[in-house]
Amino acid sequence: MEQRHQPIDALEESTIQQLASQLRGALIRTSDADYEQARQVYNAMIDKHPALIVRCVDVADVIAAVNFAREHELTLAIRGGGHNGPGQGTCDDGLVIDLSEMKGIRVDPVARTARVEGGCTWGDVDHATHPFGLATPSGFISTTGVGGLTLGGGIGYLSRTLGLTIDNLLGVDMVLADGSFVTANVQENADLFWAVRGGGGNFGVVTSFLFQLHPISMVYGGPMLWSLDEAANVLRYWRDYILTAPDEVNGWFGFVTVPPAPPFPEQFHLQKMCAIVWCSTAPQEEAEKLLQPIRTNIPPAVDFAGPIPWPVLQTLFDALYPKGLQWYWKADFFTDLSDKAIDLHVKYGAQLPTMHSTMHLYPINGVVHRVGANETAFSFREANFSEVVVGVDPDPANNERMIQWARDYWMALHPYSAGGGYVNMMMDEGTDNVKAAYRDNYERLAQIKAKYDPNNLFHVNQNIKPAS
Ligand SMILES: Cc1cc2nc3c(=O)[nH]c(=O)nc-3n(C[C@H](O)[C@H](O)[C@H](O)COP(=O)(O)OP(=O)(O)OC[C@H]3O[C@@H](n4cnc5c(N)ncnc54)[C@H](O)[C@@H]3O)c2cc1C
């Protein structure tokens, strides 16, 4: 039976005090001075007012908060890094488990693993692993939470080389809906481990992740930019190149507006351009050889690709996208990128509605394809490209315009897509789109959901309904 949701004012003050007495972390309430700051998430379009925010500092706090929400039938949201587009790290009226104080990381340089607590960002992970010359595949920006990104799959600069983030996940520690604590990996609770590798926050609160690390320290990467006149040529060239390139090469394509600041040459400031942002783990000389053909055939107007420390590449776009902007997301997977689809990209890419708005195509072939579509919950293993169209701007007055652009762009390309999108880059789009994202993995996810969370306590997410 689905969990009912009680208004918080039905609770006695003494009941709330009882929760506070069980916690080492702070219990933040609407009357507290830090409430306004504490309730905000990364996307300023989300304006939710939870009644209680529990800043958990350890597993015991998480258990207390889960039990409290379940026993008192409160809406429960879990916040990792708070980056989620539709704001699924918070809720109205209910209780938020905010993991942002749980930032412990233990690197084992011999086993090449890292145990990472649920409130870490990827910047925290890079900070901890880089001194050992090690890293694990994450995303394209360092401020994103490990929690949400990993549980949805994890597409990033190293996907072609090392697979998705979940392909490098060795295990999780979790608090389940009944308040019990479990470990899930290939040996223990293997069904749960299958489900959390792509199935999002549907199955419980992950208090820590165990990742495989790899010897990655310096990479060869950074952006190349071309004028929009070259966009169709660049897209075609990039498509053909990336479909057959060695696994050591990653490079996503995007339409961007050049920020009006150094290091970009002034003549390009605020110009709409197209870009490829590279990341190669090949040794420098080899990486240069791998990128030489594009430099020769379609010389970029701006070329910043070169040797770069991994954590620096990861933080290149952090300052451009601070917390507090308005964000609207649309996503799809593609197996092909036909010339007709490329023409449509060029048409809508030229219409970026605001300086921060963008469209990215991430290549997800290479090692991502070497895991089967049913081996983890992440279904689209045969797709070659993950598309995201995002309207972004500081000013809510531009929302209508940028949302319309993102929808129009997505609609125009959708007929060419593989039929579903990446759950981490969607808004709250309803059950049909969640099903489309998981395809034939959905039914198995629903069965596992019914086993571990039969009353759908964890429903503030791209929700998988428990099988009846
Ligand atoms: C600027 C920006 C860049 C991004 N870049 C990438 C990228 O390169 N690659 C990519 O794959 N994605 C990327 N994303 C998308 C990102 O993966 C999702 O927004 C993801 O949901 C963020 O995770 P979070 O922990 O920060 O978010 P939150 O809002 O905290 O949580 C998101 C969802 O995950 C659940 N969750 C989070 N932590 C836990 C946990 N420990 N246990 C159980 N459930 C949990 C929450 O309940 C919620 O449903 C980006 C997002 C932004 C805003």
Image (spheres, rainbow, N blue to C red):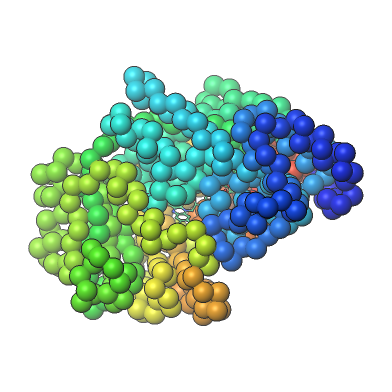
Question: Which quadrant is the N terminus positioned in?
Answer: top right
Evaluate whether residue 230 shows in this view: no
Q: Is 29 situated left or right of 224 in this image?
A: right
Which of the 4 image quadrants contains residue 429? bottom right
Q: Position of residue 2 (x, y in %)?
A: 81, 46
The residue sitting at the front extreme is 33
The residue sitting at the top extreme is 110
Q: Is 197 situated left or right of 462 in this image?
A: left
Residue in the foreground of this view, choosing between 77 and 350? 77
Question: Which quadrant is the C terminus positioned in?
Answer: top right
Q: Is residue 42 above or below residue 16?
A: below
Q: Is residue 419 above or below residue 72?
A: below
Residue in the foreground of this view, choosing between 242 and 229? 229
Q: Is 201 situated left or right of 398 in this image?
A: right
Residue at 47 percent across and 43 percent down: it is 121
Residue at 68 percent across and 28 percent down: it is 60
Residue at 30 percent across and 28 percent down: it is 132
Q: Is residue 353 above or below residue 212?
A: below
Q: Position of residue 59 (x, y in %)?
A: 64, 29
Q: Position of residue 463 (x, y in %)?
A: 66, 51
Residue at 83 percent across and 44 percent down: it is 73
Q: How many marks?
A: 0
Residue in the foreground of this view, choosing between 361 and 315? 315
Q: Position of residue 187 (x, y in %)?
A: 54, 21
